[in-house]
Image (tube, grey):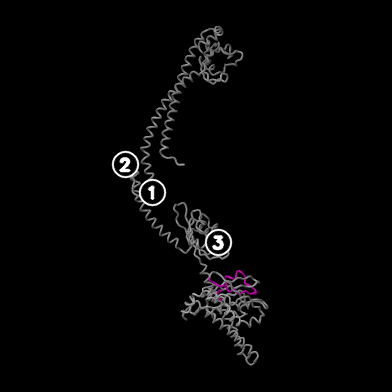
Amino acid sequence: MKIRLFYKLFIAFAAIGFLTTLITEFLIERHLRSGLVRQVEMEMISEADIIALMPMEKIMEQGVALSERTRSRLTLIDFTGRVIKDSESHAADLDNHLNRPEIQQARLKGKGSSSRYSQSLQAEMFYVAVLIGDQKQPKGYIRLSRSLQEVNNSISALRKSIMQGLFLVVFLSLLIALLFSFGMISPIRKLAAFTEKIRTGKISGQIRIQSRDEIGKLADNINEMVEVLYEKIRKADEEKRKLEAVFAGMSEGVAVLDTEDRIESVNRGMEELTGQTAANMTGMTILEAFRNVELHDLLERFRKTETIVCGEILLGEDRPVTMDVTISGMRGETSNGRKTILVFHDMTRLKMLERIRTDFVANVTHEIRTPLTAILGFVETLEQGAVDDKSKTLEFLQIIRDNALRLNRLVDDLLILSGIEMGEIGLHPERVTPVEALERVLLLVEARISEKKLKILNEINEKTSAIRADKDRLVQILINILDNAIKFTPFGGEIAVSASPGAEGFLIIRITDTGVGIPKGEIPRLGERFYRVDKTRSREMGGTGLGLSIVKHLMKAHGGWIGIDSTLGHGTTVSLHFPIFRDSELCMLQGTTEENRIAP
């Protein structure tokens, strides 16, 4: 809780006033008490001197009367300290008094005094003692004791008067201090209100203080400082807006760590790369936010070397992404430590393209080399004399023909795929009924179906909605999918073809087989050029590895997409999503020319 300056000053003045009052009262009371006690001492010593001149026997006889006359308790003590007479108690009941302070002083100096609290009387007492006789031949001691209650009462009465006067003085002083505080606090409050506006960014005008003292000088200094500060803030805001625009617009992920290696801020690119919000990541360590040991090791290496560190890491578990990380230091706002900046470049697509390019070159080379090797080998065999054996010659020629056809299919598929990607293959969308296209396809593969004794379950009929597609390309798509289903379904298996409404405006044609299935981890790579789950078996069956890639591009050209669901050992389902044909599109299709091309 903040205490205002006015109250601080008022409390300070009040504390000074009360302390002054207490100290003054203490000193006066101390001096007064000392004087009164000295007066009582002198009076009691005078009375004791007079009594000491009397014979001890007479003192014993008149002890009570002398006590009343002196208003003190009288005690007669012999030179050994034994009490002979006491005006208020039996002498036999009292202890030896030789060691009492006042008696010891009287024995040495002839007179003695002391004050102490009496446990028996429950009061503060003052004692004086006078030696009877001389110091060489002492006869005894006269001791008078009197309560200091009268002194305390006098002091209390006087204290009350003194305190009343002092409190009056303090009150008047506080009243003056109050007026002085108001006069001093008023300009300070103006300064505080003005600086508060500056703190919140509401800088407007200057402050005017009509004062020629230090407060007036302070106001002038603040006005000058505000002008300089306003200009600096304007420039800083301009630079900040530029940096924020650059920071937010970067596609790379950027994270700034504070001096304790906790995330201080991240940009939008980092949020998109990690799938986490800036609020969730702020305050975390790198290990907590990314859970990546390689990244943590890179950061530790940077801490040791204090130089820029670059490295490549994998983030994520289900679908890991490749990140190129650059770690560098930047000066913090203080000299107590260095902040750290981490820049993440998503290299996943580039790595994937490099891998696809490498695989493509390797696969094309391999796919071409294999049939060429077979052709060259059998040609050399024929040249070496096998041509004379007619049966062998025919067998070798058939093998050469099969490999030549395989090369031809490979080249055709590559040309088709290249044409699709380059937008050079014409597409003529029209109203097509799935049952019509499927009948054409089944006629083409009927011989192979019979050869493997497969059972076809066709659930598509005339009631199935028409789709918007290029009829020839639709047949090509269905042939590729059915060809794969026939290849990988064992003898006596089943292939089911069905259709059902999908997302709004789409029809799903599903082709389900009871074949060998595909491992879950391989499904995302289906559609890549030359990619085969079982490379050896696929080549033996005559596949080029480009069929699904062609289907994928043709589906995209039709405005649809392909989905594959499979379980190893339990078959595969391929879902083809085609846009449903609408009657409103008929006029538009009639105006379509042959120059329609597939968008690259």
Name the residue tied to disc 2: 210
Q: Which element carries disc 2, helix, strand or loop?
A: loop
Secondary structure state at the residue bearing disc 1: helix
Mark toward the viewer: 2 or 3: 2
Sequence order check, earlier mark of 2 and 1: 1
Q: What is the CA distance from the residue labelled 2 to the residue labelled 3?
A: 66 Å
- Amino acid type for the residue under numbered disc 3: Glu
Query: Hey, what amino acid is under mark 2?
Result: Gln
The earlier-in-sequence mark between 2 and 3 is 2
The answer to which image quadrant residue 532 occupies is: bottom right
Above or below, 89 against 383 in this view is above
Q: Residues within 10 Å of mark 1 (few under 14, many from 20)?
A: some
x then y, percent, for residue 371: 59, 83
Q: Nearer the viewer, residue 294 or 398?
A: 398
- In the rendered structure, which disc, 3 or 1, sits on the residue that comes first in sequence? 1
The stretch in magenta equals 505-529
The crowding category of the residue bearing disc 2, from other C-alpha atoms within 10 Å (few below 14, some 14 to 19, many at least 20), is few
Residue 509 among magenta residues: yes
Q: Which mark is residue 294?
A: 3
